Image (cartoon, rainbow, N blue to C red):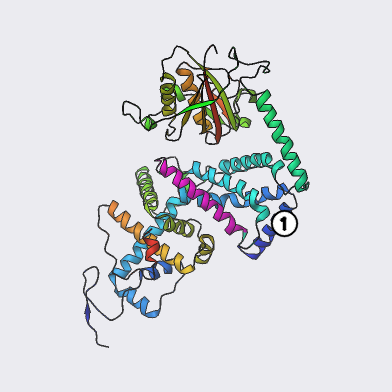
Amino acid sequence: MMEKERKHPDGEPRLGTEPCIAAENLSAELDGEYHFSAAEQDHLKHCRHCRSLYESYRVIDDAVTRSLTVKCPAAASERIRRRVNRQLDALAPMNAHKPIRFSALAARVAAGVVLAAMAGYLIFVDNPYSDELEEPARPLPSASVEVRPEQTAVFPDTSPAGVDVRHVRPTATGTDSVQFMDPESAPVKAEHVAVIPQTVRQVWLFDPAWKAGRLEKSFRSALGKTEIPLQNVRLTLTEDGAYRTNLTLTRYQTVVLNRQLAGLGLQLISAVQPQPEQKLFAGTGRETVAYEAVFIPRGR
Amino acid sequence: MNGETGSYEERLIADFKEGSRERFDELVKIYTQKLYRLAYGLLGNHHDAEEVVQDSFVRAYRGLDHFRGDSSFETWMHRITLNLARNKFHWNRRRGEGITVSLSDRIDGADESEDVGDMELPDSSYSPDSLMQKVETQSNVIRGMNSLPEFLREAMVLRHVRDMSYDQIARILNCPVGTVKSRIARGRELLREYLMKMDGETAPAVPPGKIENTNKAELSQ
C-alpha cells in the first residue's frame, strides 16, 4: 500500500497508514479491558497525539481516584451500624421474616383492631376540642369548635410585595440552638431530649382582634423563614373562623416553624413536641413528619 | 465476588431469612466500607454518604426476604446504594446544594487516626501549599465529575472508586459491557475537556470517529 501524508489532529503531519487508536480502546486499555495489538503499540510509540491522549487519561484516572476515594471513618462506620440497628428494632415487629407468622385473616383482624384503637385515640384523647383531655399542658379553648371546610386559600408563590418568600433565610433568632442528636450520646439526661413523633398535630391560638388576612400573612411569613415552598400549601378557613393546614415537613422545619409561629404572637396549646422553647431533639432533622396545624381565635 | 465470600454471604442471608438478626449485622459490617466508598464517590461529601449507606441497609433489610439471588448480593447492594445516591444527588441539585469539599476532609482514603504526614503522596514536594493545591484540584475534579451526565458519572465512579471490572459494572448498571466501555471512555474525555478548560487551556480536539460505537442517543441525554 502506498504511504501518503495524513493531516494529524494536532496539526503535525505524519507518514504512515495506521489510523489513530480509537479513544475507547485507549481508555479500555488503561482499565485492563483491552490489549493493544502489535500495530497499535507501534503506532502509540510514534503518534504524539495518541500518546498525549493516553497520558492525559492516565492523569485523569489518578485525579479521580485520589479525589473521590475515601475510607469510611471508624466513627462513621459505628454510627451507621448503631442507627441501622435502631431502625431495624423499630421495623422488627412489622417485618414478616420473624418466626411468628399471622394468617391473612388474623392479620386483617389485628389491623382492624389497631386502626380502631388509633381512631379512638384521635377522637377521644388527642382531639384538641375534646373535653376528655384531662391534663392539658396548656389552656384549652373555652368551648369546642366544630371545624368544617368552607373555603380554601391557596398561597401564591410570592408575597404581595413581590418578594419571593421561599428564599428568605431563617433568622439567627429563629433557628439558633436547634440541635438534633443521638439520645445515647446526648450530654444531658435523655428526658431532656425531645422526641418529635411521625405525626404532629398542633393547635394554635391567635388574637381574635387580628384583621382579616393577618393570620394568612403571618403563616406565610413563618413558612418562608422555614424555606418551605408555598405552591402546594393550603390553609383552609372554616365557618367557625378557624384555619387548618396539613404539611409534610422535616423535623428541623417543624422546629423552625414552631419558633416562627410563636415569635409572631401565636400561642401553642398542644402538648405534642416540638415546643417553641425546646432546643435538643432526638434523631436527625432530615426525617419527615406529617404536620397538621389548626389555628383558632383565642376565646372560642 | 469470589466463591468463598459468596458462599459465606449466602449462609448469612439464609440464616437471616430464618430469623437471625445478628447475621444481618454481619452483612452490615462487611458492606459498610464498600458502600460508603461508592456513596462518597457519587455524592462527594461524608454526611450524605453516611445517610445513604444507612438507608441502603434499612432498605436491604426490608427487601432481603424477596432477594431471589438472580444477581449476587454485592451487585444487589450496590444497586440499592446507587439508586439512593442518585435520588440524593437530584435532591441536592434541586435544593441548589453543590458538592462541597472541606479542608478538613482527608484525601487518599486516610482514616481519622492517620496523620497527614503518613499519607502516601504522589510527589515528594509535600508542603501546606501543595496540600492546598491538591484540595483545589480535588474540588475541580469533583466539580468536573458533577458536570458529567449521570450515566457517565456512575460508570466512572464504579470503575475508579470501586475498582470494578466492566463486567461487574455492567451487571450493576444493567447494561451491556460494550456500553460500559463507551460510557467510561466518554466520561474520561468529557472530564479531560472540563479540566483543560479550568486550567485556561483549550482541550485538543478529539479526531472524528475517535470515540467509536458510542450510543449517540444515550450521550445526547
Q: Residue A88 appears in which quarter of the rendering? A: top right
Relative to A39, is B22 above or below? above
**Residue at the (42%, 34%) spot, across then down:** A229
Horizontal side of A129 relative to A8 (left or right) equals: right
Relative to B105, is B66 above or below? below
The residue under label 1 is B14
> B7 or A203: nearer the eye?
A203
Quarter that holds the N terminus of chain A:
bottom left
Residue B73 can be seen in this image: yes
**Is B95 contained in the magenta span?**
yes
**Residue at the (68%, 23%) spot, across then down:** A124
- The chain letter for the residue carrying disc 1 is B
Residue B125 can be seen in this image: no
Q: Secondary structure at mark 1?
A: helix
Residue A117: x, y in percent?
71, 31
Residue A226: x, y in percent?
44, 29
**Extent of the magenta region:** B73-97
Residue B176: x, y in percent?
49, 67
Relative to A90, is A215 above or below? above
Considering the whole magenta stretch, tell me its main secondary structure: helix
Residue A144: x, y in percent?
60, 16
> B135 or B31: nearer the eye?
B31
Tag 1: amino acid: Ala
